Amino acid sequence: MAAALDNIRVVLVGTLYSGNVGSACRAMANMGIRHLTLVAPNIQNGWDEGEKMAVHAGDILRNRRETATFEEAVADCVAVVGTTARGGLYRQHVKAPRDCAADIVALAETGPVALVFGREDKGLLNEEIAQCTHLVRIPVDEGYTSINLAQAVLIVCYELFTATGLYHPPHEKAPPAPQAQKMQLMKNWQIMLNDIGFMDEKQTDHMMQGIHRIFSRGVVTKDDAAIMLGVARQALWAHRNPKLEGRKPSIA
Amino acid sequence: MAAALDNIRVVLVGTLYSGNVGSACRAMANMGIRHLTLVAPNIQNGWDEGEKMAVHAGDILRNRRETATFEEAVADCVAVVGTTARGGLYRQHVKAPRDCAADIVALAETGPVALVFGREDKGLLNEEIAQCTHLVRIPVDEGYTSINLAQAVLIVCYELFTATGLYHPPHEKAPPAPQAQKMQLMKNWQIMLNDIGFMDEKQTDHMMQGIHRIFSRGVVTKDDAAIMLGVARQALWAHRNPKLEGRKPSIA
């Protein structure tokens, strides 16, 4: 799947502002995509802002390929994915990036894939759209549909990176608490809560339902259960140890 | 679900650069989220860049709330979602935004929810993380894990907006082609391909498997089928009409 990302190329067509190119480079690096092609760039403000926005992805910016034409940028690609913010006759088969990310990653396992983004002011032209094998539109609110170029690059790269399954979110190191430990926890808390006078015998069943509900949601791992078992043990000990009475804390 | 988005508040803590705030405003507007709170902003470069980057989301920037403390910014919230790029003891229960987006949207149906983003240079402090009810980490490539502030805002807002189900991607207006039309298409193409000499009787079954495979993937709607039926009809007519012989085109 890392090979798939290495086959993915971001193609920016007629880009006007180097800051957007630099921000796009950083977004690409965040998502493990490192090949950038600029088609007929039309940079209005020099490259300083681009270098600045790329931060630690300056290598992507400096290793960019530039081509005079769209055709040249994508000639070797097995899929050319165009992005569009607009609707219209030639754009009816657009999909959300998430809905075609798996297909695009699968194609990228077989050869180069281009993700093509148009100009800041007018996107891709109809004759460029006509060369795309896939069209995607990023879901946006109808109140403000124009998305910044680098932001668009980020979303599409993020969906492809996520679709590779390469990222594994961190997970709890502690194993889940087994049922016996959870039942021990409920039993010890009941003894403790009776002992400290939180509830009397009559209220016990009712209150323990509430405690059980809270612990069912919150006490997940063995470590969680060990902490709450310790609280019950200490509360019992403290209540039975009169020496502590003198420094009873006041709490809200 | 739109009500849920209206209950979501982006909280930026100790932000240094107004351009990031402005870009975040635009990203929020793109995703239908319009409430911004800045906690103790520490803007180094004035607000011009912020106004510029917000583009048509300047109202979000100008309507921002500013608070001196984190506590004040989130006191009324039913959930406080912290974002972190780092791991560590207090961050083991982080989830990917996609994996908790539905839960967060459900909470936002019941009351205000804060999405909290830390400083550009050092994120959220441990004492701020300790006040969060949820922690999220955006999936990133291990080669470059530091994501721009506004880009992080975009991803989290995008996941929540997507989870609301408010966005409906455009779909093909033409209805799917029924089987009878598809079979008519295969029959007419077979007649035409035999007639123009593309294949002889012996090759017919083999070639028609290929045509069928291509059309199975590509001819989806009634309009698609009508176009390819028209091609077969016209090719037959042209072949049987000798007047056209004189302007036979040459193609690659």
Image (cartoon, coloured by chain):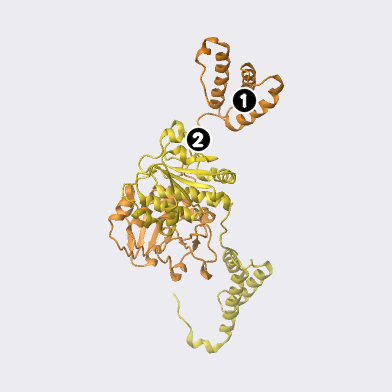
Chain colours: A yellow, B orange
Residue A21 percent across, percent down from the top left: 40, 50
- The alpha-carbon separation of the residues under discs 1 and 2 comes to 20 Å
Are dots 1 and 2 in contact, CB under 8 Å? Answer: no
Q: Mark 2 points at which residue?
A: A93
Q: Report the side of A1 relative to B22 (left or right).
A: right
Q: Which of A151 and B125 is in front in this view?
A: A151
Q: Which of A131 and B126 is in front in this view?
A: A131
Residue ID at (66%, 69%): A183
Q: Which amino acid does label 2 sit on?
A: His
Tag 1 subunit: B
Give residue A249's position: percent from left, percent from top.
47, 81
Q: Whole-percent x and y of residue A108? A: 56, 45
Circle 1 is placed at which residue position? B182
Q: Do labels 1 and 2 share a chain?
A: no
User: The C terminus of chain A is located in which quarter?
Assistant: bottom left
Which residue is at a point 60% across and 29% down the rendered structure image?
Answer: B215
Within 10 Å of disc 1 (Cα), the crowding (few <14, some 14-19, many 20+) is many
Query: Residue at the bottom extreme?
Result: A243
* Of B50 and B71, the residue lying toward us: B50
Q: Quadrant of residue B242?
A: top right
Name the disc covering residue B33, or none. none
Give the image location of residue A144, x and y in percent: 38, 44
Horizontal arrangement in the rendering, residue A205 relative to residue A81 (left or right): right
